[in-house]
Image (cartoon, rainbow, N blue to C red):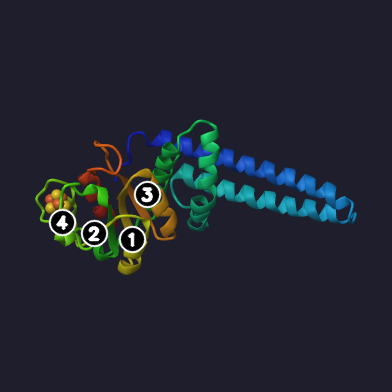
Amino acid sequence: MTSEPEFPSKKRLFLGLLILTFVIVLVAVNILGWIGTVGLRQLNPILPLMAQILVGIAFVVISTIMLILVMTVALGRELPFGHKLRGLMIKVFLPMMIIIGRLFGVSRENIKRSFIEINNQLILSRHLHLPPEKILLLLPHCLQLADCQQKITNNIENCKQCGLCNIKDLLELAHKYGTKIAVATGGTLARKIVKDYRPRLIIAVACERDLTSGIHDTYPLPVYGILNQRPNGPCWNTRVDIKRVEEAILTFSHQ
Ligand code: SF4
């Protein structure tokens, strides 16, 4: 499967922010350690030494995590413990990176877009080939034509396949390849769908915000993210590149 052409710049942005976040964490650990050492000296002369040892251990652990994560992102494949550290990156470092990125004028959307691409690359590197019924195609409600009266969130098969929105094409793909497919109106329904369908991989279509929170909420389940297109602005009659969705299905399924 091909990556988007601007991927190297997204990777650079993500790597830069990741390294900057780690440097700030390491500096903060050192400052806290120094403050603790000064304060503890009043209580017992042995305590500063113990505090320094603890700071030293924290420094080594954080530096090792940083090295593995940076190498994982730079090489685009999961290294030993990379699978577990992906969770740390999603749950701990990404929120910190968004705050730090904002301080340097990088938009939240740009950071999330970079994260989604890096996450996709790591999932691709696992070379998953699953039975199609273990793959869930999870779609946002805004892909449905706003004027359409069909209730597709309860059951996407209610779509009359008129072709006025991409739901028809996506339903055809699911039928053709045998994947599961569902439409979610928000995070709560998405979590319920995932619980009911119990997929081993999700191909999710959504905006930067929903994809990032979906990847976060369903970790360690792999979520391959495809950004929707918003010719009418956010959350309104959105579209998706059907070829990219089909490529993703073919990449991850036994056919
Ligand atoms: S393809 Fe037609 S019937 Fe189906 S959801 Fe879109 S507008 Fe409604």
Which residue does the numbered mark 1 point to in the structure image? 189
Residue position for label 3: 210
Q: Is residue 205 visible?
A: yes
In space, the residues marked 1 and 4 are separated at their CA atoms by 18 Å
Residue 80 in view here:
no
Q: Which residue is mark 2?
A: 153
Q: Is mark 4 within 8 Å of ligand 1?
A: yes
| Mark-to-mark CA distance, 3 and 2 | 17 Å
Find the residue positioned furthest to the top: 105
Amino acid type of the residue tagged 3 in the rendering: Asp
Q: Please give the name of the residue rendered at 38% of the width and 57% of the height, measured from the top-left corner.
A: 222
Crowd class of label 1 (few under 14; some 14 to 19; many from 20; radius 10 Å):
few
Q: Could you say where residue 92 lies in the image, as x and y percent from the top left? A: 54, 51
Which residue carries the number 4 mark? 150
Which label's residue is closer to the chain start, 1 or 4?
Answer: 4
Q: 190 left or right of 241? A: right
Residue in the picture at 63% in, 40% down: 24
Percent x, y of residue 242: 20, 46
Q: Nearer the viewer, mark 3 or mark 2?
A: 2
- Front-lying residue, 16 or 25: 25
- The span from disc 3 to disc 4 (Cα, nearest Å) is 23 Å
